[in-house]
């Protein structure tokens, strides 16, 4: 029927239900067929329809093979590995390993309060597992500064109840805490990926992450300045708790109590690290200079000088002898009674590590996937990272491992093109674990702290730019979220800071999603077209008492909770901003028309709330119309009894037909 030429025939609920049933039948086509899925792609394409049983079984077998390759990428890239990639992968693995070995030792000893073995095993075992299951070809999986710090804080909290943290019993407690955290992190990550919850990275804002990273950088810097000044023994006596307390401790004790030799070694090592990095930036065209591992150079040089000049006799703490096995067995099931004893106390830390680690990993994975032109799956990344940490937890004392933005970028820069680079890196780290550690006996611990301080500069690099950007854009909510994370982490601890900020971020998401997006429609003069009056000045509400509302999103339990209040505001105040204390600017509606072309789905709770809303309007003698209904909402409304409540006439094809009925009765 042409617009304006009379009323359209109202849809029959039984025919609507039949149409919906047909659509559901169409959706079921191919339910028992097999779909080809290419490795690395998340979409299905091509339905196999072959009546021949032999062909069918061949297709099914081929599909299973493709599914295996999809979920276990190692079965796809290893048989098809090209030797042309080998040189770049080996070079990338060696380069990253030369940087990772001293870094992992630093993170384990200085941040996690663990043995160097914890960091080295964490830099090797998860990387091997990830190479077979991960979808990112350049991602380097190993311990991270922020994660190691969180483990260290959990270890420190448990050791508060122990009289001698440096005894054999204290070391066993450290191993138990680290092991159970790694196991929980792996389990949580695996379950998040298995239940396809990889979208969590979109919930947390960039401002929250920047505030968290900045706070982590300041916390790490404060923690590392203590050993760099040789104040570790004194700090264990004074025992300042928060980062703010440690800052005050440094201000009070640096001048009178600092060890001069330790201080000189620490800041000389830091100066050499920074200097070598600057030199590398100046000579990027010379590959042998650009790829020089400055961290490894400083470690070797400081170890040699410490041995030569006996710095340890001047009060400089050294790494010392590191036994390869500090437990009864090299491999143990993590569900030991000693480990389970600390399960509840470490669950919150494990969940926090899982969220923070995944966010870093997925950013690194997406950057490399975009750079080298392939796709990744956040859910499969979670499964791969979870499995990697679960495997690592079978080696007692291993730290949680996640992807690194910096190391992954270097991996790609140097020539890493497949997961083979990760296997090479892990193999080199394992060799270093068993054969290199005795050579690092005289490595000064303060040099390890200097190496970590170099990471702090990278973490803080983007913070000023982000603050300036949010200020320029008047993004006060983002700035507040950023500073809330930062100050809570400094004044209390990292867990409190990130938990409060995540809670604030989730509340903001819920607050915004709870407001149903709606607008008032008006007629374009001389036409039967209806447009939003706030976007089209020529649109007019030409029928007094009639309110035409377009709902611009799907309906669910969250955004329909405030639907009644939002409609009341539109009815009394229009689309502009208003305060409830103001006098109404519009008369109450006698006709309410819902334009629902944008509503593709609605859940049962939303339909129930919508039913109650219509009952209330009907009790006020307001005429109701539903227009532009799609099949799914139509079926839901039919099941809920909306047709019986409003009558078939209330359901019209479009707004023009509904308004023809309204104008015809006036």
Image: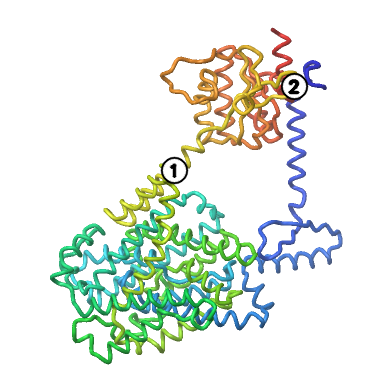
What residue would you read off at disc 2?
528
Residue found at x 66% / y 20%: 625
- In the rendered image, which quarter contains the C terminus? top right
How much space separates mark 1 and mark 2, taking CA atoms?
41 Å
**In the depicted structure, whether residue 154 falls above or below residue 527:** below
Total count of labels: 2
**In the depicted structure, whether residue 596 falls above or below residue 400:** above
Question: Callout 1: helix, strand or loop?
Answer: loop
Nearer the observer, 211 or 275: 275
CB under 8 Å between discs 1 and 2: no
Question: Callout 2: helix, strand or loop?
Answer: loop
| Horizontal and vertical percent position of residue 607 | 59, 30
| Horizontal and vertical percent position of residue 190 | 51, 62
Q: Is residue 88 left or right of residue 28?
A: left
Q: Is residue 338 visible?
A: no
| Horizontal and vertical percent position of residue 178 | 36, 69
**In the depicted structure, whether residue 541 falls above or below residue 493:** above
The residue carrying pointer 1 sits among few (fewer than 14), some (14 to 19) or many (20 or more) residues within 10 Å by Cα, namely few
Q: Which mark's residue is nearer the viewer, 1 or 2? A: 1
Q: Which mark is residue 210?
A: none
Quadrant of res 605? top right
Q: Is residue 56 left or right of residue 412?
A: right
- In the rendered image, which quarter contains the N terminus? top right
Q: Is residue 6 left or right of residue 205?
A: right
* Farthest-out residue, bottom: 308
* Farthest-out residue, right: 52
What residue would you read off at disc 1?
475
Residue found at x 52% / y 60%: 363
| Horizontal and vertical percent position of residue 397 | 37, 73
């Amino acid at each position: 029927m042409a617009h304006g030429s009379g009323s359209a025939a109202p849809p029959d609920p039984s025919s609507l239900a039949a149409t919906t049933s047909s659509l559901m039948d169409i959706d079921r086509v191919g339910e028992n067929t097999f779909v080809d899925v290419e490795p690395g792609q998340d979409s299905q394409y091509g339905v196999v329809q072959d009546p021949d049983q032999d062909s069918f079984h061949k297709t099914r077998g081929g599909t299973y093979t493709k599914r295996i390759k999809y979920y276990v990428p190692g079965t796809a890239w290893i048989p098809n590995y090209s030797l042309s990639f080998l040189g770049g992968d080996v070079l990338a693995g060696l380069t990253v390993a030369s940087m990772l070995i001293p870094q992992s030792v630093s993170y384990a000893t200085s941040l996690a309060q663990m043995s160097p073995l914890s960091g080295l095993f964490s830099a090797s075992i998860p990387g091997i597992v990830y190479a077979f299951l991960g979808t990112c070809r350049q991602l380097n999986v190993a311990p991270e500064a922020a994660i190691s710090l969180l483990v260290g804080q959990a270890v420190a909290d448990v050791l508060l109840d122990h009289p001698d943290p440096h005894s054999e019993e204290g070391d066993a407690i450290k191993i138990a805490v680290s092991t159970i955290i790694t196991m929980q992190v792996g389990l949580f990550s695996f379950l998040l990926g298995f239940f396809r919850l990889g979208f969590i990275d979109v919930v947390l804002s960039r401002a929250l992450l920047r505030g968290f990273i900045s706070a982590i950088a300041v916390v790490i810097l404060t923690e590392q300045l203590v050993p760099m000044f040789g104040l570790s023994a004194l700090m264990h006596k004074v025992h300042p708790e928060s980062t703010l307390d440690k800052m005050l401790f440094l201000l009070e004790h640096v001048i009178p109590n600092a060890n001069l030799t330790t201080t000189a070694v620490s800041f000389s090592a830091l100066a050499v690290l920074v200097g070598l990095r600057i030199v590398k930036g100046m000579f990027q065209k010379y590959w042998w200079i650009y790829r020089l591992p400055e961290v490894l150079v400083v470690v070797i040089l400081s170890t040699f000088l410490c041995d030569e000049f006996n710095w340890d006799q001047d009060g400089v703490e050294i790494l010392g002898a590191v036994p390869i096995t500090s437990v009864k067995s090299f491999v143990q099931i993590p569900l030991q009674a000693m480990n389970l004893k600390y399960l509840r106390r470490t669950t919150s830390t494990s969940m926090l590590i899982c969220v923070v680690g995944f966010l870093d990993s997925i950013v690194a994975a997406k950057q490399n996937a975009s750079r080298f032109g392939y796709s990744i799956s956040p859910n499969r990344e979670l499964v791969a990272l979870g499995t990697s940490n679960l495997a690592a937890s079978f080696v007692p004392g291993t730290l949680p491992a996640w992807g690194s933005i910096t190391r992954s970028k270097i991996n790609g820069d140097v020539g890493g093109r497949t997961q083979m680079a990760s296997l090479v890196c892990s193999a080199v780290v394992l060799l270093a674990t068993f054969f290199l550690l005795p050579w690092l006996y005289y490595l000064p611990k303060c040099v390890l702290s200097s190496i970590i301080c170099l990471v702090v500069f990278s973490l803080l690099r983007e913070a000023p730019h982000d603050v300036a950007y949010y200020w320029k854009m008047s993004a006060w909510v983002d700035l507040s979220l950023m500073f809330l994370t930062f100050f809570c982490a400094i004044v209390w601890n990292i867990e409190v800071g990130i938990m409060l900020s995540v809670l604030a971020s989730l509340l903001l998401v819920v607050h915004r999603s709870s407001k149903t997006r709606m607008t008032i429609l008006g007629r374009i003069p001389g036409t039967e077209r209806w447009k939003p009056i706030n976007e089209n000045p020529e649109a007019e509400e030409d029928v007094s008492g009639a309110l035409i509302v377009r709902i611009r999103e799907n309906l669910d339990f969250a955004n329909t909770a405030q639907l009644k209040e939002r409609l009341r505001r539109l009815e009394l105040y229009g689309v502009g901003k208003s305060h409830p204390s103001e006098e109404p600017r519009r008369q109450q509606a006698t006709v309410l028309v819902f334009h629902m072309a944008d509503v593709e789905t609605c859940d049962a709770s939303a339909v129930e709330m919508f039913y109650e809303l219509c009952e209330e309007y009907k009790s006020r003698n307001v005429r109701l119309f539903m227009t532009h209904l799609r099949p799914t909402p139509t079926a839901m409304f039919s099941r809920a009894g909306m047709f019986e409540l409003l009558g078939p006439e209330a359901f019209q094809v479009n707004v023009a037909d509904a308004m023809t009925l309204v104008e015809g009765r006036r």
